[in-house]
Image (tube, helix red, strand yellow):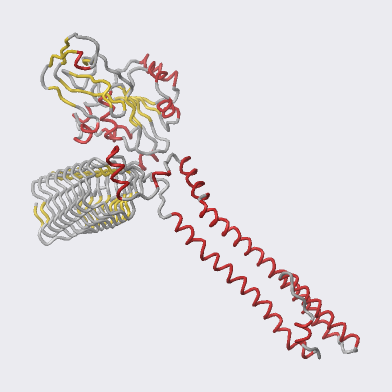
Amino acid sequence: MGFEKETIEKVWLGLNQEERKENLSNWNIKNKKEIIIPKGLVIPYFQEEKLIGFKVRSSDWASSYDEFLMPGSQFSPIFLPAVEKEKVPVIIIEDELAAYLLEQEVGDACTILALKDIEEIDKLDDTIKKAIDDAMLLIIAVPKNYSEHKLQVWRDKYPNIKTLPFTIGNNLFELPKNNIDIRTWVMEVMPEDFVKKHNININLPKPGKLSKDSLLKDFSLPTLDIKGIIKNFQTELKAFHQPKINDLASKKTKLEQEITKIKKDLEPKLKKMGLEPEKALNSKVPEPKDLAQQGKELAKIIKEQKEQLRSHNKLTPEIEAKLNTSAKQASLMGENAAKRYATEVDKLTKAKEKIANLKSGKTIEEFKDKLKTQGLNPDRLEPLTREQVIEKYQKDKNLSQTMLAGLDLSGLNLEGADFTEAICSNTNFTNCNLTKVTFNKTIVDKAIFSRANLEGSKIKKSILKYTNFENTSLKKCTIYMSIILETNFIKSNFASANIKMSSLQKAKLKDINFHQAKLSMNSISKSNVNNAIFLESKISKCIFQDNTLDNTNFSNISLDNTIFIKSKAKIFYL
């Protein structure tokens, strides 16, 4: 049907292999009636983590017309928001199962809504209604023989709605059966800019030819929506303002020295005029109230000396002009110095006020208020201790939006923990049990995972850089839309892992085990892949560029639309 293993697990699709007789009272239904649950595909419905109902498709799984509905079940429209948070297209499709397949293929870029009838629109909650109203484009996916009357009802309510007819057959599942790519089919009705932004195809050259364009032309990994990262906020703010405070104090000293220099510059000029510099500049100068006043007092002294020279008939026009210039200069320099000093004092006062607010907690509280407006819980961004991590994990395994920077968590059992939007900088996870954990939009920087067990873990839309995963088990893990930079995976085990739409750059992949792994739409560049084992793996639409591949084993692999460029290998097993 086209479903990937990860999708089947995520939506809990099941298989009832034989008919089962069940008494409704066993399902907390006040009825002793016995029912028969047919064999077939089981589609469950959840409200958060609680099972609220299920359906069974017994014959044609692609059709919803012969569904068995479990008595007592509650059903609601399947709403699958896009990974991207900006305005995105909303695609409406009647069948719930088809909605899950559509989300698997284009869920990074489009929101999917399963809705059988337009009359259900009015029953939708406000979140879904808002998604429809804010949609960049509203699309309804239908069979070619879909009722024109039904389409007109949709158009009457949403005049700009676009139809997306199935290329073949009467349901979405016919497309992959006939080798029609669902993502390509969807993108045919999208604007050109949107298609370019969400293009995940690799521009492979023709056999024997070199591509003139970049292999990754129009290909881009989605940006990560990681908000409000706080690290050592108080210390950094103090450190930021302290140099400014020191600089202001230094400037005050320099301004005072500048006034002294003005006096010294005037001394030889006063001597030439027959005046006593000590008497003129010091004895008669009162203690200035400020720098501007000091400049005025100095100008006044010069003017008084000028009048003394005049009274003794020693004031020539040349000397008078020089004294006038000196007096004006002294007054102006005092005013300028006062203005500059006032400006710097104002800056100093504001800086001191900010530090006072910081010490009192006012600034941090204001910052927390801003975080709340962003939809973040500021209390969860306070640095945790090892003991607090253990306490939170034992409570509900929820470590999302937590600050784990610098923590030593080595040896802990954190199975199934949720690290969504957590900060794991310089965090030590050595020998931890991290099976089935979730790293979603998580920052992992200079962390240590040596000899940890991450089997079945999910790493999505995260950044991993300068991190050590040496001798780590990542069997059956999922890595999706993530960026991995200069990270050490030497001797790690990725058997049966699923890595999709991710970038690995300058990674240490030596002696790594990719046995039966699935790699799709990835870029692996400038990495050491020596002695790696890709035995029986499936590699599709990947680029291996500028890597070393000595003794790398690619035996019995499935290789599709993948290119190796500028990679070196002494021995290469195929």
Q: Is residue 244 left or right of residue 181?
A: right
Q: Looking at this view, is 547 or 531 the one in front?
A: 531
Image point (90%, 89%), residue name: 312
What x and y, as percent, mark residue 182? 26, 32
Q: Is residue 60 left or right of residue 306?
A: left
Relative to residue 235, is residue 173 depicted above or below? Answer: above
Find residue 320 and report its image quarter. Answer: bottom right
Image point (59%, 62%), residue name: 348
Relative to residue 341, is residue 558 depicted above or below? Answer: above
Count the numbered circles shown: 0
Find residue 33 and report its image quarter. Answer: top left
What x and y, as percent, mark residue 222? 34, 44
Q: Looking at this view, is 250 or 387 the one in front?
A: 387
Residue 219 appears in the figure: no
What x and y, as percent, mark residue 383? 37, 50
Q: Looking at this view, is 171 or 99 the one in front?
A: 99
Q: Looking at this view, is 126 or 107 the one in front?
A: 126
Indicate the quadrant containing the N terminus: top left, top right, bottom left or bottom right. top left
Relative to residue 55, is residue 410 depicted above or below? Answer: below
What x and y, as percent, mark residue 148? 36, 16
Image point (10%, 19%), residue name: 18
Residue 563 appears in the figure: yes
Find residue 508 and report its image quarter. Answer: bottom left
Q: Is residue 241 left or right of residue 223?
A: right
